[in-house]
Image (cartoon, grey):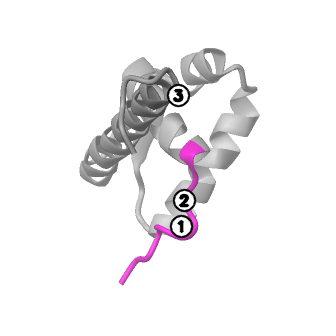
Amino acid sequence: MVRIEHRISLRHLRLLDAVEREGSLARAAERLNMTQSAVTKSLQEVEALTGVPLFKRTNRGATATAYGQMLVGHARAVIAQLRRASRELDAWKEGHGSV
């Protein structure tokens, strides 16, 4: 059983999203303001954590594997939930929510 919830970070989730959207480690690096080598290393970390290949890398870019597609979907859901929580916190701070 793979237990990633204690090891995977928000940085990893954003990385997965960016690589899948951009279709390239180089373009994902630009989007995230990282070096390509840092993106490669982070992606390798996530693949080591999950124990499965998440992207197929070629000289033309990176394509999500079935594992990658599944995990990217979860990553996007987590990111979206955190954005909603942030908006809700802002609304509460402005007095538009209740405790």
Residue at the bottom extreme of this rendering: 1
Query: Pointer 1: what residue?
Result: 49
Three-letter code for the amino acid on which mark 2 is drawn: Ile
Where does residue 80 sit, x and y in percent of width and height?
Answer: 35, 34
Do the residues bearing badges 1 and 2 touch, measured as CB atoms within 8 Å? yes
Q: Nearer the viewer, mark 1 or mark 2?
A: 2
Name the residue at 55% across, 46% down.
10
C-alpha gap between disc 1 and disc 2: 8 Å
Query: Pointer 3: what residue?
Result: 93
Name the residue nearer the viewer: 86 or 41.
Answer: 86
- Residue 8's disc is 2
C-alpha gap between disc 1 and disc 3: 37 Å
In the image, is residue 7 part of the stretch drawn in magenta? yes
Name the residue nearer the viewer: 94 or 75.
Answer: 94
Q: Which residues are magenta?
A: 1-10
Three-letter code for the amino acid on which mark 3 is drawn: Lys
In the image, is residue 2 part of the stretch drawn in magenta? yes
Residue 5 horizontal side relative to residue 33, left or right: left
